[in-house]
Image (tube, rainbow, N blue to C red):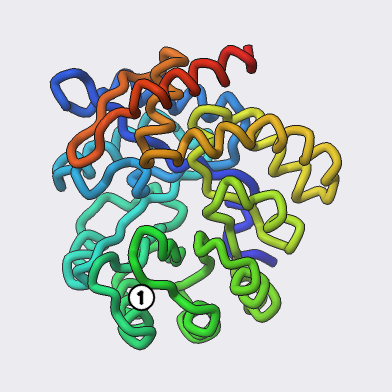
Amino acid sequence: MKLLSQLTGTGAAIVTPFNKYQEVDYTALGNLIDFIINGGVEYLVTLGTTGETPVLTTAEKTEIIQFTYAHVSNRVPVVVGIGGNDTLAVVNELRWLPLDHATAVLSASPYYNKPSQEGLILHYQALAAASSKPLILYNVPGRTGKNMTAETSLLLAHETANIVGIKEASGDMLQCMEILRNRPEGFMVWSGDDALALPQLACGMDGVISVAANGFPSLFSRMVRYGLAHDFQSAKKLNDRLMPAYELMFQENNPAGIKAILSEMGLIAEELRLPNVPVSAALKNAIQDYLALQS
């Protein structure tokens, strides 16, 4: 029995909308939450790195979490992202950020520091001890500069009770299959790569924590459900429609790509906080062309 079976399927790593004054746009956030939930996703991830958490203040993080709980109103589970490259600071956030209505915490591995595998183990063990909620590992070496090996992930999975799953975004299929082959009972594995989600579902992953689900919640979540049901012919038809979107979303930077898509759909303003900037004119034109084909 999976410990977090309610998180099987698609989780949307939701963006943080800003207005033209660079303030969090809570009206747009509420509309986006409704759009995603009505599209059929199984749960939301608030304050993931797609939510531009490195450029949010501590007060904004608290407000976003509380707003999300209230607006979701128990319609779907909510996972809260809490990570960083200062272990003590992350421990402190785990202790004071409002987690009362969270199903779990997703924590990206430390960026820039490039710790050893032992450092990663000790970091996550400290977080697991401090967290009042189940902890989900997040391996994304393309962003952090350091891969968490299958051996490290499995050691944490087997030896740390409060660590209950991993979002794997290494892009290394052999590493992913090694984790799936040797994970303990109840330990869940989610894809962190929209473009690789379908083959990873075929390998046995439990779902996807997705950027694409912001803009295409119905298409993407149906694709994932087909994959989980081993109906790969139906899943492939939907995935084929989404493949150009995967490329457009990440061509320049994330979340600029998905924010441009959401802006074209009239859901949010195309506003980002520096150092991220909106997409180029050429990419925006390509996004407009793709969306026109989908309508």
Q: Residue furthest front?
A: 282
Q: So how many labels did they put on this image?
A: 1
Depth check: 214 or 27 in front?
214
Q: Is residue 154 left or right of residue 45?
A: right
| Percent position of residue 37, x then y | 54, 29
Residue beneath the point at 59% across and 41% down: 42
| Percent position of residue 248, x then y | 50, 33
| Percent position of residue 94, x then y | 26, 62
Name above or below for residue 109 compared with residue 184: above
Q: Based on the displayed image, in which of its 4 quarters is residue 173 positioned?
A: bottom right
Residue beneath the point at 43% across and 32% down: 258
Query: What's the residue type where badge 1 is placed?
Result: Tyr
Name above or below for residue 116 compared with residue 290: below
Q: Based on the displayed image, in which of its 4 quarters is residue 184 positioned?
A: bottom right
Q: Quadrant of the N terminus?
A: bottom right
Q: Is residue 15 left or right of residue 215?
A: left
Residue beneath the point at 64% across and 47% down: 9
Q: Residues within 10 Å of mark 1 (few under 14, many from 20)?
A: many
| Percent position of residue 43, x then y | 53, 42
Question: Considering the numbered disc 1 on the image, is that residue within a helix, a strand or a loop?
Answer: helix
Depth check: 26 or 53 in front?
53
Q: Work out whether residue 105 can be spotted.
A: yes
Q: Which residue is mark 1?
A: 124
Q: Quadrant of the C terminus?
A: top right
Depth check: 75 or 220 in front?
220
